[in-house]
Amino acid sequence: DHDDDERANVFGRLGEGKGAGAGANGAPLRKPAPTGRNTALTQTVALDCEMVGVGEDGKRSILARVSVVNEDGNVVLDTFVAPTEHVTDYRTRVSGVRPQDL
C-alpha cells in the first residue's frame, strides 16, 4: 500500500488543480507522472469529471468528460461524453472541453 507521501507524489496535493495554474501554496502546478505501465483497475482510483453548461444561461451542468487513473497514476479511462442537451457554455477555460471535442 502507498503511504500519504507516495499518494501525494502520484496524485498531487489536495487543492492543486484549482485556480489558474497555481497550487494552494502559489507554486506552479505540475502534472503527476505515472509510476509504471500498469493501466489495470486497482483498489484505489481517482475520478475526475468535467462539466459543461446547458440551458438558456448555461448555468445547469451536464457531464462532458470522465477521466480515471489508477493508484499508479496511469490512465484507465479518459473519454468525452455526448451531451444529451444543447451546450450553451463549454466552460473551456476551466473544463478544457471544446465544441469539436463533443
Image: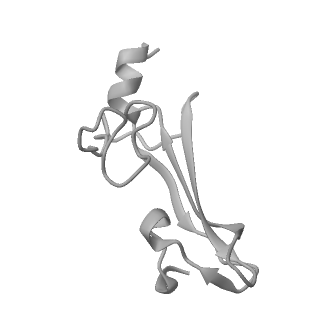
Q: Where is residue 31 drawn, in percent x and y? A: 29, 46
In the rendered image, the vertical position of residue 39 relative to residue 9, given as above or below: below
Quick check: 100 above or below 53?
A: below
**Dividing the picture into quarters, in which one does residue 35 lie?**
top left
The answer to whether residue 90 is left or right of residue 54 is left
Rendered residue at 40%/34% (across/down): 11
* Residue 58 image position (x, y, % from top left): 67, 77
Residue shown at 70% from the left, 68% from the top: 62
Nearest to the observer: residue 87 or residue 26:
26
Percent across and percent down for residue 30 are 26, 43
The residue sitting at 75% across, 79% down in the picture is: 84
Residue 9: name its quadrant. top left
Q: Please give left or right for residue 72 compared with residue 45 in the image.
A: left
Q: State how the image is colored.
A: one colour
Query: Could you tell me which quadrant the C terminus lies in?
Result: bottom right
User: Is 3 situated above or below 91?
Assistant: above
Q: Is residue 63 left or right of residue 26?
A: right
Q: Is residue 12 left or right of residue 80?
A: left
Q: Quadrant of residue 56?
A: bottom right
The structure residue drawn at horizontal position 64% and vertical position 84%, both measured from the top left corner, is 88
